[in-house]
Image (cartoon, rainbow, N blue to C red):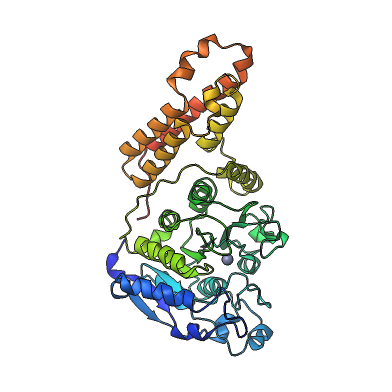
Amino acid sequence: MDDSRGVGLYYHKAMEKHKAPTNQSHEEAPQRTRSIWRTLKDKGFLQRCVLIEGREAMDEHLLLVHTDDHIRFINGVRSSHVLIVARLVADEELSSGFAVVRPPGHHAEREDCKGFCLYNNVAVAASFLLEERARSIEKILIVDWDIHHGNGTQSSFYDDDRVLFFSVHRFGNGFYPGTKDGSHEIIGEGNGAGFNINVPWLSKDRSNADYIVVWDYVLLPVARQFKPDIVLVSAGFDAAKDDPIGDCNLTAEGFAVMLEKLREFAEGKVVLVLEGGYLPTNLSDCVLACVEVLTDSHVFNASFGRPHGETYDVIKLVRETLSPYWPVLADEVLPVEVLADQVRETLSPYWPVLADEVLPVEVLADQGHQDSFMDSDPGKARMAALRSARGLVSPAVFDNLSDLSDAFAEGVAKLELLNRRIKDSLKIADQPESSGR
Ligand SMILES: [Zn+2]
């Protein structure tokens, strides 16, 4: 990456004037962005980054997404001019950027304010790029990792195959916005069919590991086929631990890894736009970690443990639903963790150790996962994969396979299949990964 271009940071002091007129303890408060900016300042990032002076969006740009009536209705509260950051990154004047803005935008519909959102900042920026930078920006990946579904962004590009919209969010039991729009079955229509991906969590308490496997087995494979020219992130941090609204357990490290993985696309042209996140101290830590990633100064030290069992069910559902549009998702090679769980379930009546809650299998698999991510050296990545493989099919199980009765047949078949797939995946790991950066 060309470091000389720098990372853009956008902030507009006028945002702090926007507050709930009657509710002094409203979660969407000026304290949110003020705290972020102070943290970035204290850590020296205001000196290291390119500061983009805030200004208000012009009607002609808001009209790309919203109606005239909508703009007149909200008259007086202006949107931040987020698209300036997106334009500078698209034009390669900046390597990447983070727009620290409020109020959030991803719930705002064409003609409707929703949630705490007035204007859909990300949708306006994406529409602007597609209109005004059509020659260099033909395809945009929008990743919405806010804990709420990005309904407004989804409807802005629902029939548009130039935008791949991906949202992972809590869903059901009345969780906001509480409609069916966030279901995994809502996949886009017309030209946009297959270009809308929803990953719905049916329960709370999701953690880093859940997000990372969704990245690895849904988002990244599809994005590699889509090949975006730029990545916009609806960067809400209300899935972070202790957030008063999200009830999940992500950490700053989790967001850092999710972002790092997105930098493989579009030569690292990534623009984050702040959405939710309602515990200012947490929010600041998460944004700081992301800015460290963008400036190549983050030290990765994560160990994420094991994903929630239900996460694999969601991954399977999403893969099945979208595989007609993205053949890579129909791939026979299932996530190795899913296979391990299947094998474990089949064999655990005979080998109680396999029913243990904490198995070396998962630990090793997770370590392999981590190491191969951390290590760009294919040799080391292969060693990590080998360690996982040994853990998955332990010698103790193998030594006894010859004595197995018919009752084991199904399990053995699965083990053999698993072995073959592990071998296949090792072959893949042998080849150096092509990297845009
Ligand atoms: Zn949110």
Taking depth in this image into account, of 188 and 292 the one nearest to the observer is 292
Question: Which residue is located at x 34 percent, y 33 percent?
Answer: 383
Of the 4 image quadrants, the one containing the C terminus is: bottom left
Question: Which residue is located at x 38 percent, y 44 percent?
Answer: 433
Q: Residue furthest top?
A: 403
The answer to whether one can see residue 289 in this image is yes
The answer to whether one can see residue 135 in this image is no
Question: Which residue is located at x 52 percent, y 36 percent?
Answer: 337
Q: Residue furthest front?
A: 25
Which quadrant of the figure shows ligand 1?
A: bottom right
- Left of 387 or right of it: where is 352? right
Q: Residue furthest bottom?
A: 76
Residue 377 place in picture, x, y as percent? 31, 42
The image shows residue 63, relative to residue 191, as above or below, that is below
Question: Which residue is located at x 36 percent, y 63 percent?
Answer: 294
Quarter of the rendering containing residue 198? bottom right
Residue 281 place in picture, x, y as percent? 44, 68
Of the 4 image quadrants, the one containing the N terminus is: bottom left
Residue 136 place in picture, x, y as percent? 45, 68
Taking depth in this image into account, of 286 and 180 the one nearest to the observer is 286
